[in-house]
Image: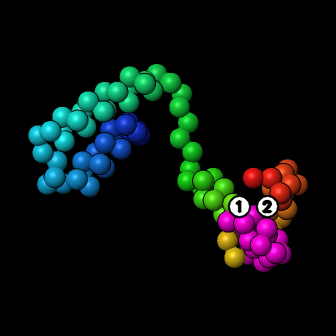
Amino acid sequence: MRKDVVDDIFDRVKQILGEKLGGEVSVLLEKEEKIVRRLYGGDMTYIGHSGRRETAKAKQKALVMIRQGVSVKDASKKVGIGHMTMYRYLSKRTVNDK
C-alpha cells in the first residue's frame, strides 16, 4: 500500500531538518500539515512527474537560443530535447511571442 503523500513529504522535511527540528519548528510543521490537509483533503489532486517541468524549462532555454540565431536542431541538442519536440512547440507559437 502506498504511503500517504502528505506524510511522506513532511517526513522528508523532518529528516532534512534533523537536529534543527526543535519545539517551535516542530509545532509550525504540524500546523502546516493540518493546513495542507484542510486545503487538499479529499481532492483528487494530481502530482505530475518532474519531467514535464524539466522539458518546459528546456524548451524555454532552446527558445532563447533560437532567438539568438542558433538553429532549432542545434538548440534542441544542446538542451537535451528532440528537435521534433521543439518544432512542434514552435508550430504552436511564434518565435517572437514572449
| Highlighted range, magenta | 61-77
Residue 5 percent across, percent down from the top left? 40, 39
Q: Nearer the viewer, mark 1 or mark 2?
A: 1
Marks 1 and 2 close (CB-CB < 8 Å): yes
- At x 31%, y 27%, the residue is 34
Looking at the picture, does residue 64 appear above or below residue 9? below
Looking at the picture, does residue 51 appear above or below residue 7? below
Horizontally, is 65 left or right of 38 in the view? right
- Point out the tag, 1 or 2, that comes first from the N-terminus: 1
Q: Is residue 72 magenta?
A: yes
- Depth order, front residue of 28/46: 28
The secondary element bearing badge 2 is classed as helix
Q: Quick one: quadrant of the N terminus?
A: top left
Residue 28 percent across, percent down from the top left? 23, 35
The image quadrant that residue 25 belongs to is: top left
Residue 14 in view (yes/no): yes
Q: Which residue is mark 2?
A: 85
**Mark 2 closeness class: few <14, some 14–19, many ≥20 residues within 10 Å:** few
The image quadrant that residue 86 belongs to is: bottom right
Q: Which residue is mark 1?
A: 59
Looking at the picture, does residue 29 appear above or below residue 91? above
For badge 1, the amino acid type reads Lys
- Depth order, front residue of 59/83: 59
Residue 55 in view (yes/no): no
Q: Give the Cα distance between marks 1 and 2.
A: 9 Å
Q: Is residue 18 magenta?
A: no
Q: How many marks?
A: 2
- At x 60%, y 53%, the residue is 53
- At x 11%, y 40%, the residue is 23
